[in-house]
Structure formats: C-alpha cells, structure tokens
Image (spheres, rainbow, N blue to C red):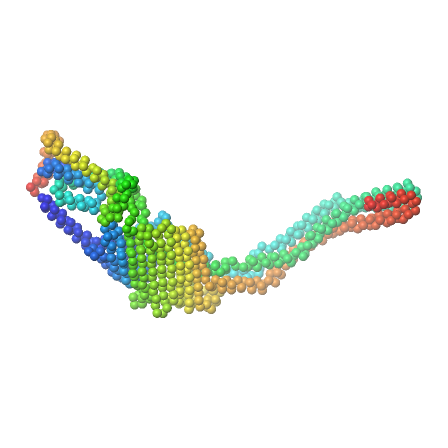
Amino acid sequence: MFVIKLLSKIVGVLRSGDTPNQIAWGFAVGTILGMTPFGLCSLLLWILLVFLHINLTSAILGFFLYKLIASILAPLFHMVGYDLLVQIPFLIPLWTSLYNAPIAPLTQFNQTVAMGSRAIAVVLFGPHFFLFRWIVRRYRETWEAAIQKWKIVQLVKGSRLVRAYVKIRDWGG
Amino acid sequence: MRKKGIALLLILLLAGLVFVWLSLDRWIENGLESAGEAIVGAKVEIDGFDLDLVNLSAGWQRLQLTDPNNTMQNMVETDKAALKLHSAALLRGRVMIDELTLEGVRSGSPRETDGALPQKESRKKSDDPSILEKVRDRLKKEAANLPVMQFDPQAFQKKLNVDSLVAAANLKTPERLDSVLAETQSAAEKWRAFATDFHPDDRIKAIRDELAGIDVQKMNNLPELISTLEKLKTARESFQSLQKEVQDASVAVQTDLSRLNGYKEAFPLWIDEDLAQIRRMARMPDLSARGIGKQLFGPALLSKIDQVIRYVQIARGLAIRKNESPKKNKPDRTGKTIEFPDRLGWPKFLIRGVSLSGMTNSDKDQPGLLLEGQGQGITSQPRIYGKPTFIRLAGKNEDGRSLQFRALLDHTTEMISDSLELKITNVALADLQFPSNDTGPIRIVKTNAGLAGKAWIGNEKIHMNLRLDLNNLVFDFKGIDPGNRIMVTAQDILKTVNHLQFSVQLSGRPDALGIDVHSNLDNLISDKLNMMVSRTLEASQQKIRAELTRIGNEKVPHVQSALTAFQNESVGPILGYGKQVDDIQSMLNDKIKAAEGKQQGDPTGRLRGLLELIKKKS
C-alpha cells in the first residue's frame, strides 16, 4: 500500500499543474532538508518553503528520500565537515568570526556532521535541481505515454485496490 | 491552496510556541536538576523555576542539594534566587549570568524524602580519577589500616611481669656459658691428643743421666778436657731442644686456660647485657606520640576530612566543570564539535558574580550564624574566561562565634592551583565520641570548638593542614573498660585537661600521601604509660638480675667442672715437665761452673777458649 501510495505521489507530482521549475525547486530544497540535521537553518528553509511558490510534495519527497540516504552517509559528512573546519587553513578565520558572531553559533556550524552535510547538500543542490527538472520534462514529453502502455501499469490501474484508492483520493475534489 | 497551507503552518507554529512557552520552565528546571545531580551524586531539586524571556531573567523559589553522605538531609538549601542572563552571550550560544542572588542559604536542613539517586543514575566513577578522588581512596585505606584501639591488658601485664619478660627475651648468658663449656671440652680434647704424642720423660732422664756422667774433676789433660767439654756441649744442645718444646706447650696450655677462665669476669657483664635487652623489649613502640593520636582520634578525624574533601570536590565540580570528555561512540557517525578561539572571552557557562545570604543552622527560628558571601568567575571554561574562581563566605555573632571561608580556584592554565582557607571560632559542639563514632568510650558531652584549616590542591599534589581546638570540655567516661590501661590512663589525663587540640596534616601525592594526626594528649598519655613500664622495670631490676644469675648459675658448675678436668688432665702434667726442665737447667749450670773452676789452672788458655765457646753457644 505504501509503495503504491509513493508511486502515486511521484506520478502525481510529475503530472501536476506546477511547472517543472517549481517541482525541481521543491525537490532540491527537500534534499537539503533531508541531508542536514534539524536546526535553525532547516527551520528557516521550511518557512521559506511554505511562503515561496514551490512544490511542497516534491520537497517532502526529497526530504524523506535524503533522510534515509543521510543516515548512511553520516561518516562521509563527518569527514567532509572535519576537513572544512580543521584542515583548510584559509577558512579558519571565517569559522572563528562565525564562532564569535551572534546567532551563527546556534546553527551548529562547528559540528562536523552538520557542516559536512550542509556543504554536500549545497554542492548537490544545482545538480539535483537540473536533474529533477529534466526528469519532469522528459516524463511529460516522452515517457508518460509510453509508461501508460506498460502492462504492469495497466494491471495496477485496473486493480480494485487502486481504483478504490483513487476514488477515496478524489473525494475531496 | 497555498494560503490555506500558510494559515495551517501559522496555526501550528503558534501552537508550538505556546507549548514551548508553557513547558520551557519545566524543561530548563529538569535540565538544571539533571546537571546538578551529575555533579553532586544525589538529588537536586528546584522548585518554582521561572524564566522571563522578555527581560532575559530567571529565578527559583527553592533549591535543595542533597548531601550525598546523608541523603535524608540537604548539603545546601536556598530560598529565593534571581539571575539575569547576558543577552549578547545568549545569541552566541553561551549562558552567562551577570549576577546571581541567593537568599536563605543554609546547610544540613532535613529532607522530607530520601535524596538518594537510583543506582543506575548515581554518578559513575571517572576512568581518570581526580586528585581528590585519589586522596579520598588513600584516606579510606589509611583509616582501614589504623591500629585497632583494642588495648590488650594481658599483653600489657605481660610486659610488666618479670617471668614473662625473661621467658620472652632472647637471653645471651646461657648461650655464652654453653659456648665456654664447649670450648673447654674442645681444648681438653686437643691437649689430650697432644699428650699422646708428647713424652719428654725419657729425654729428661737421658739428659739427666748424661749430665750425671760428666765428671769435670777428671779433666787432667787436654784430651780429657776436650772430651768432657764435648759431652757438656751435646747435653746442652739436647736440653735446649727439650726446653723449647716444653716451654711452648706450657705457654699454649696456660693461654687456653686463662682464656677459658675469663668467663668468670665476663659473666656479670653478660647478665648486664641481657638486662638491657629486656629493658629495650619492655618499651612500647606502639605507644609513641603519633601512635596514640592516630589510634584515639584517627578514624573520627580522617572520616571528617574525607567528608570535607568530598564537599570540596563537589564545590570544585559546581564552580569549575571540566570540559566534557569526548563521547565514546564513533565520532564519524555522530560528529564532533570543533572549538575555535574565543575573541570575547565568553565561556559556555559563566556566573560573573554571586551574592548570597544565609545561616549556619537549618532551623529558621535558631539560625545560628548569619552568613553573607560572594562568588566570582564560576565557569565551565576557566581557561577561556582567564580569571580564577573566587568564593568568600563570612559570618559573625555577638557571642564571639565566627566563620570565614575563602577559596581561590585557579584552573586558568595547565597548572591547577586551588587554595582554600577555613576558620571557625567558638562553635558549641555536643556529644562527640572517640575513638569511633559508634562505640567510642570517651564522650565529649559539650565543648566550644575552633577549627582552622588551609589546603592547597594542585594537579597531582595536595597539602592540607587542619587544626581543631576544643575548649571548656565536659567528658563522660562511662563506656571505658577498666581493664583497658590506655583508656583508663587517657581518662585520668582527660579529667585534668580543659583544652584539647588535634592537628591533621596531609601532604604529597595521593599515591604517597603523608598523613599525620597529632594531639596534645599524645605526649601526656605515652609518657605516662612508658613511665609505668619504666617504674615497674626499675622495681623489678634486682629480681630480673637474680633470675638471670640463677639461669646462668645452672650452667656454671658444668663449665667449672670441665675447666678443672682440663687443668688436672692437661695443664698440670705439662707444667710438671717444665719444673723438671728447670732442674736440668740447674744441673747443667753447675757442671759449667765446675768446668770453669777447673780451667783456672790451664797454662795454654785453650781450655778457657773451649769453655767460652760452650757458654756462648748456650
């Protein structure tokens, strides 16, 4: 049921009325939220997400997907964070200034896993955005018609379970 | 759709804020209690905590720090407290309190509930114990190894009993007499063996016959003269050989005899030596001054010092907290917090100043001394703050009672240096028992006490001096066992004493800590007990000497008999040969004189020349 729901959500996002840019923005921001630990920065991002006109569902999708990945990648985040905070001499004055500045210490910037995950999330933000935008466009232009013809999709769509789920889903209009 | 979402989010945010607002005080209160319990090792309770986020101030109505040594009473209890947080520091993730005011601080107040922590929550012992933990361990070992104050009256009586003393002593006189006896028997055996080979009788007879056969009157011509003189010369040579052998044997046997006879003069000296040894043995090294102080008051005082050190340890833990040690779990999973140079000199936690007022008694109706105090620089990161922690507490009453406490805890560099000073005067104490708190037979019903202590604690060294003066003493000796001579003696002395003084000194590294406990009773009691022993020994000296002589005299007849036998069997005959040799010497001299008379008529002088030659050779 969960898998069907997830697939339905993904398809729903791809087929929604939002533009590919809005969907890709949502997904990319969601990946940042998923990778980084909860704190002041993530709170601000969540607020931005609500206020800006970007796709929330894709953001939540990105968040959950990368939350799972982040727990596996924690040692990598620590390694990157440690290198950034300790091994690169020209950055140390910047960190020292932040350490002594107001607010910044509350963001846990000097925590290796937090720093590493943020750095990687920021670096991957662009690729995530462009990749997801390409996927949405390709889906709408080419893949959708082909996928609808897949036997497995026909089978799934024809099943009582899915029809019942769609009915319930569409009740609210 | 998005507007609805924003509204929903705002509602959620508002609800969250209300929840946080309502719960924040409780969360902080719980956090502070947990942190305090980790340091104290017993329950810490804060009632009525209130945080004002608008004015950045906080306070509580009541704080209780349970005494970990007695969890049914509080080590410290306070009434109202107020503090103001530093806003700029708070924005930088630091908690800085500019001024903390504590009212109604008191110690020893009873608790309504047990303040012990559940076993699993009690503070775990650090893998790397601090110097104070090491010192406390050392004190516990020292207290456990103190000699038990169970004086054995039988052992004491034994020390004063002549027979027991003589029996216990390792006496040398009998051994020496045995040795003389063995030597005499050995010498007799040696001379007996000598006598089997030494037979001068035949040679004496031969020389005597030879001399008797020489007739100097028959020297009428030269050949007769020469023949007579040749005989004289031969007899003389034989005699000289015999004389030497006999004389050597006589000297040797006489030397042995006089050496063995020497025991008669040595015998009284040997008894003196044994007597001195018994006197030494009767002295009681366990009654040295230090010994009595330690035995009588050691356990109680060391227990008190352990308690004091425990409080110092807690005070150090509250005032200066070590930087948290790295967590044990793998750092690559949970990460690591990197610290950078602090340009503002703001540690993670700091109380710049504390003002407190309180009392020494827990009872508000009888508050005891009214106290006031200040504290400065109470911090979790003294090296960043760069200033030592300073605590001062003082109180005085009209009746002369006073308390002063000062502490300077300097952890600003690698070399830790904590100095503490405490002075309490004229405090009324009651019902103190020694040597142990439970069964001590000496009970001080009431007294006025004064306490002065100084301590310095470094990284690996500690120096502590503590002096306790008890004046206007009223004792109760009901529990003293009349057979316990030390305690009875102590009682006799204490009856005349109005001032007791104890001093304790701890010094050095924990693994080689010097612990000295002294009191003004030490010398009094030890002198009195040693005097008792000396007097008894003095009175018994003649008895001991007689006993020693009796033991010696049991051996003397055997030695004397062996010596007599040696004298009769060996010495007498050898000396008898000497007498016979002397007789021969006279005969020889007579013959030579006669020959000299005869040579007066020798016209050629040749006879004279021969005689001269014989005389020269003899």
Instruction: Classify residue B425 by image quadrant.
Output: bottom left
Residue found at x 44% / y 65%: B500
Left or right: residue B168 versus residue B315 is: right
Which residue is at a point 38% across and 54% down the rendered structure image? Answer: B417
Of all residues shown, which one is farthest toward the left? A173
Query: Which residue reaches farthest bottom?
Result: B399
Q: Nearer the viewer, residue B141 or B176?
A: B141
Q: How many marks?
A: 0
Residue B551, image x, y percentages: 62, 57
As drawn, A143 above or below B493: above
Q: Residue at x 24, y 52 (%)?
A: B88
Position of the N terminus of chain B, as image quadrant, is top left
Q: Position of residue A95 (x, y in %)?
A: 26, 44
Q: Is residue B218 left or right of residue B493?
A: right
- Relative to B118, is A42 on the left or the right? left
Asked whether the viewer can see residue B223, the reply is: yes
Q: Quadrant of residue B68?
A: bottom left
